[in-house]
Amino acid sequence: MATPTVAANAYANLAKMMERGGAEKAGQAVAGPSFSALLKDSVGSVLEAGKKSDMQTMAMASGKANVMDVVTAVADTDVAVSTLVSVRDRVIQAYEDIMKMPI
């Protein structure tokens, strides 16, 4: 289950990525990362969240980690995976909509 803190952090990270890319500042176009670079970074962050969750779980199993840290890591991973699945679904839906357009 997502907590308000996790959601706020996810929103802040998205705002930082969007600020770096494609926005015009002071009349000058700022070259930002491509869509594929943003997608690659997002998938990489999901993988990192999963690895962190796995490491926390293994540390708890060996008695070296706090239960709260494990729950937080698992929640972060859950939010990241849910977001990735939602984006995937929207991309597939957009592709299908484009394919349905008459030529």
Image (tube, rainbow, N blue to C red):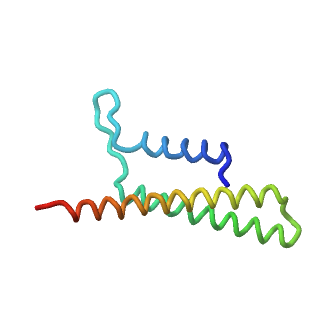
Q: Residue at x 60, y 63 (%)?
A: 48
Q: Is residue 50 above or below residue 16?
A: below
Q: Position of residue 19 (x, y in %)?
A: 43, 39
Q: Residue furthest right?
A: 63
Residue 42 in the figure: left or right of residue 76? left
Q: Residue furthest top?
A: 26
Q: Is residue 39 above or below residue 26?
A: below
The mark total stands at 0
Q: Residue at x 22, y 65 (%)?
A: 99
Q: Residue furthest left?
A: 103
Which quarter of the image is occupied by the N terminus?
bottom right
**Near-viewer residue (99 or 24):** 99
Which quarter of the image is occupied by the C terminus?
bottom left
Q: Residue at x 76, y 68 (%)?
A: 57
Q: Position of residue 35 (x, y in %)?
A: 35, 55
Q: Is residue 41 above or below residue 5?
A: below
Residue 24 in the figure: left or right of residue 60? left
Q: Position of residue 71 (x, y in %)?
A: 76, 58
Residue 1 in the figure: left or right of residue 86? right
